[in-house]
Each structure stands twice: as structure tokens, then as C-alpha cells.
Amino acid sequence: MRLIRPEDWRPSGIDDLEPEAWNALRHEGSACVVAGPGAGKTEFLAQRADYLLETGLCRAPHRVLAISFKTDAANNLAARVRQRCPPEFANRFVSVTFDAFTKSLVDRFLNAIPADWRPTRPYEIAFPKHKAIEGFLTTARLHAPPEWHSEIAGYGPSNFEPKVVGSYRLPMGPIAPQNAAEFAVARWWAAQLRPGQTSSLTFVGINRLAELLLRANPYIRRALVATYPFVFVDEFQDTTYAQYDFLLSAFHGGQTVVTGVGDDKQRIMVFAGARHDAFQRLQTDFGGARFPLLFNFRSSPDLVAIQYVVARALDPDAAPTVAQTVCQVDGDVAQVWTSQTKEAEAAHLAQWIANDMVSRGRAPRDYALLVKQKSDEYEQEVAGAFAAHGLQIRNESHALGKTSLQDLLSDELTRLAISIFRLGATRRAPAAWQLVATSVLALRAVGNHEDARATRVEAELTAFLATLRTDMAATAPSKQSALDFITRIFDYLDLDAISRTYPEYGVGDLLKIILEAFCIHLFASVDGAPNWTACLDAFEGVNQIPMMTVHKSKGLEFDTIIFLGLDDRAWWAHTPGDPEGVAAFFVALSRAKQRAIFAFCQQRGQRNNVAELYQLLTAAGVPEIAI
Ligand SMILES: Nc1ncnc2c1ncn2[C@@H]1O[C@H](COP(=O)(O)OP(=O)(O)OP(=O)(O)O)[C@@H](O)[C@H]1O
């Protein structure tokens, strides 16, 4: 494959980048790319990957490593690079989550972890509940020397693990506690490693073990650094103590170029241990140059102006951003709707969406219902009123095994398998055929110029689909038939080939997690489906309105967002002045391309603690309307 000279390289799939993005893209050292909502951070990373790979600045066998926090973000970025970059290059782009990456290191090199900290093989993954951590801290305090009691009593169940354990570097040998923190951390590790039993590790623990592994084994670290001269970290503002320390031990002080991309104003993971100073640390420790991006490619100018009012509440020095799109709606781009009862609210909402869809020619997936938490509850409350207008809600935050519906649907392998199902259910699915044919050629490792092999592989695919189509036509959707077809399709795709071809499935447990969730969701989708097309529509949420928590909405965009439950009950943890609450509000508001609606219902709760959020809307000129 011919390389392009850096000065001749042009972005692919988009017209251009903003000037500062060009500077960041060409910058040779580490960089902090700080950009507000809609600035095109994902696009920027995809273009930079393309630039590094196609120009040979990252030459085979070297790879670009992209680390994200959420599975769907990692998948979206991998997919974007595949769209932008020829397959020979895209194969050297590894897009994974932090947890999957550190877990893959621990799993691969478990025997190289110093003996005092080595977990059992296999080990369990633990997700301890609030109450269990509270219990652990009480017992730790009771067993501690009296002079350390009060400090241990000050640790909260939500910040002990991310902050105290997360920021504690393990020594090579056992801990000889010299203070309260070391005492509590040593007990915590004993409860994770569980001598004589199967170890039970949280992801904070796994991150810490991966860091220790690299510190204890310079040759593993050298191999890592040699493989990945370029490292991207998306949503850098959410980097936790343990994750940052891992980055430091892995990539500091060598040739690795780290590009951190994110927005401090969207920092909504402090509760999960996000550092407040991640970007400053990247500047100091890695010499990261700062590149602020100032365009907003998502939201209309009036919405960008409202976002700016909220942005300044989070950072008085926030720079104004420049909208690149135009307004397509008449009247207000944002409104607050107040109602007295949940029934009245749901009925109005459903009617309004149904009308808006018709008058503006919009589809259900152009809208999103956002909530602070407990989407299952809101779904139950409004589903009936929506159904009365023929509208269906799709709760994307719903859990499916170890993942969520949202992560499953954005997964590449899921999209490939569902496309095969589509080709089995119908003859005319050109987009599905395109995706399947390209993917199968990649899975069978057919090179660009191997025309004869390509023809053979395509003929095999055609034959496989013909039999599948005949059998699906003769078989009604049921759990058993769904399972039979799933098995047949994944056998055809070949799980080993999937792990080899798509780097994200080669590390960690992603493949297993996706397969399990795929089965759960397909079994639910066959329920009541008269035929396979209806079953697949239910699986993919065709014609359904997505509902999700603000945390799940991060990184996404919709024509219209409707935030349900802007009240003290839903925002129970919010105290006036708390930047994380305002940041969550900012994230919700900034998902909208054309319109944002905030719904307040008296029956749900008061609006005292969240009064400041309403004040921001008022200051931005957003009107309040009784419905
Ligand atoms: N250079 C560009 N030219 C045109 N459109 C772009 C460009 N960069 C991004 N976009 C589009 O702008 C929108 C926002 O991009 P993206 O989702 O990457 O933003 P983001 O910075 O990650 O936002 P957020 O932080 O709010 O999630 C997307 O629809 C994307 O396709």
C-alpha cells in the first residue's frame, strides 16, 4: 500500500478540519485537545489515526492504541476509523476500553505479577455494592489501631475504592502499614486476592495490578511501548487516579506520544473517581501542548448560545464556540415545560412528539428522552401514553448481562451478525450485503489483489445465505430457532477469525459479553414477533424512541432532546453549586442539534436544589410554558 506524504494528506469523509484541529493533528509531541460539545472530538481522533497510518508516521508493525471509557465509544471510534481509512491501515488501529486493556495485560502476564499480589487464575470480577464497602470500612476501622480510627471513619463507600485504593501504588512486596490509608488498603487487597480461594477483583484492582505488572517487568513495558508509539485517550477529563497512574507507568518518559481529548465541562465521572486535574497532569508529565477547538458542528446557533451560558457557569473563562450548522425549527429552540401530574406530562409529550414527527418529517430516532437515573421507572410511567399514539420507547440503559442495550447495538460484531440475519430474512438489503461481504473478506484475510480468492469467498457467502434464507423462511421465530440460527451464523463467521481480525475482540472478555447479550436480546425480540423481519426490527429498535440516562447519552446527538424529571427527587445528590450536577445538565443540553426541552412535573418533586439549573435556562432566555 502506498504511503501519502504528510504534506499531501487530506481529511477523508469530511470537507475540512478547523485550523486548530489541523495544528493538533500535525503536532509531533503529546497534546491536550480540549474541545466543547459537538467539536468533533471523535472525528478528530479518527482523522489523526488516518493521518498517522496513511503517511507512515506510524509504520507497520507499529500500532495506534485508542483508549476510551465506554465500550460504545471504543466501538464507534473503531468503526469511524474503518470508514475513513483503508483496511490495511485500519487493522493497526486498536480501540479498546481502559478496563479491557488493563485486564488483557493482567490475564496475559498474570504469572509475571509479583507473588504477593498475584491473583488466582481464573479470578472473578467483582462489582461490590455500596453496602458491602460500607461493611468493609466498618470492620477495617474496628480492627485498626485506635489512632487511625477517625481517618478510616472519614472514608466514604463511594470514594474509598476509586480514590484511596486507586491512588495507592502497590509495593513489590507486602504492605507494612504506616498509616490509616495503608492499613485500609492492605485489608482491601486481602479481601480481593483471598488467599486459598478464587480471587475476586474489581476493575480498580485490575488497573492497579496492570500498573504494578509494568513497573515490575520492564521488558513487558518495553514491548508495550514498542508496539504503540501513539496513544489516544478519549474523554480525558474522566481519567481516574488508577487509570492515570497506569498511563504514567506505561508510557511516561519514553517516545510515546499521548493525545488526550476531552472537555472539562463534561466531567461527570467524579463520583467514579475521575481526577480533577487530568489535563494539567498530561501537560506537566507528558509535556502535552494545549489545543482548544472552537467549532461546534452539532447544535444550531441559538442552542450554542444557550450552551455558552451554562458553559460559563462551569468555567467563567470558557471561550465562545462557533456554530457550523443552521437552525431548522420555527419558534423557540429550548423550552421548559411544567405540568401538575405525570399523566398530563406523558400525554402532552407523546402528542407533541407524534405531531412534530409528522410536521417536520422526523423519525422516532431523531428524538431522545433523557433522564438523570432509573430509566426503567420513567419508561414504565410514559410507555402507555406513547403507545396510545403508536410510539414505542426503547430503554437503551437497560442491562443485558454484563453490558447494556446501547453497547450491544453499537457493537461491530452485533451489526455484522444482524446484517446476516437481515439477509436471511429478506432478499433486498444492499447495505447489509455490503457490510457482510466486506467483513467476510476481512475475516478470511483476503488481500486487495487476490481476486480469485475473493470470488470464491463471495460464492461461499452467497451459498451460505441462500440456505439460511430457505431455512429462516421455513422456521417461525422462537427462542430455539433463534439459538439455532445464532449458532450457525457465528460458526460461519468463525470466532477465532473474529478475535484475530478485530483487535477489540482479541483482548479482554468483550466477545463473550457481546455473544451473551446478543442471545438475551434476540430471545426477547422473538417474543410475539410474527416474522423474522419484525423480530429484527424489534432487536434494532427501528422506529422506537430512545430513552437513556445522561451518562449513557454522552457522546451521542439527537435532533430533539427531552429531559424528563428536572427536579430535586431525580437530582437527589445535587447540592447547589455542585459542578458535577451542572456538568450533567450541560451534557444533556448539548446532545441536541435543533431543540432541547426540559420537563418539570410537580408530582415528581420540588425544584429547590436544582433551582440554579432553571436560573441558567432563564438567564439564557429559555421560556417556561405550562402544559
Ligand atoms: N470536521 C467536521 N466537519 C463536519 N462535521 C463534523 C466534523 N467533525 C465532526 N463533525 C460532525 O459533528 C458532530 C459532532 O461530532 P462528535 O460527536 O465527534 O463531537 P464531540 O466533540 O465528540 O462531542 P461531545 O463531546 O458533545 O460528545 C457529528 O455529527 C460529526 O459527524
Image: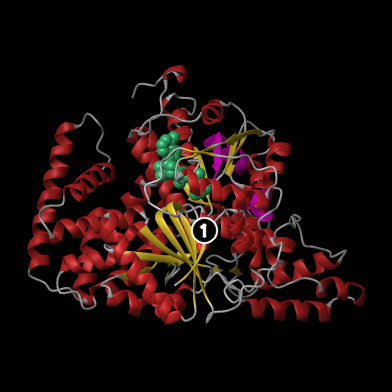
- Identify the residue shown where x is 68% and y is 70%: 158
Packing grade of label 1 (10 A; few <14, some 14-19, many >=20) is many
Q: Say if the magenta span includes residue 237.
A: yes
* Residue 572 locus on image (x, y percent): 63, 74
Residue on which the image places disc 1 = 588
Left or right, 57 with respect to 457, comes to right
Left or right, 490 with respect to 475, comes to right
Which quadrant contains ligand 1?
A: top left
Residue 180 lies in quadrant: bottom right
Q: Main secondary structure of the magenta part?
A: helix
Res. 180 visible in picture: yes
* Residue 535 locus on image (x, y percent): 21, 69
Q: Is mark 1 within 8 Å of ligand 1?
A: no
Q: Is residue 507 above or below residue 581?
A: above
Quadrant location of the C terminus in the rendered image:
bottom left
- Identify the residue shown where x is 59% and y is 62%: 203
- Span highlighted in magenta in the image: 219-246
Residue extending farthest to the right is: 147
Q: Say if the magenta span includes residue 188.
A: no
Q: Is residue 409 above or below residue 479?
A: above
**What amino acid is found at the position of numbered circle 1 in the picture?**
Ala
Res. 205 visible in picture: no
Q: How many marks?
A: 1
Quadrant location of the N terminus in the rendered image:
top left
- Identify the residue shown where x is 33% and y is 74%: 386
Q: Is residue 298 above or below residue 185?
A: above
Q: How is the image coloured?
A: secondary structure
* Residue 48 locus on image (x, y percent): 48, 33
Q: In this rendered view, identify the residue nearer to me: 200 or 530.
A: 530
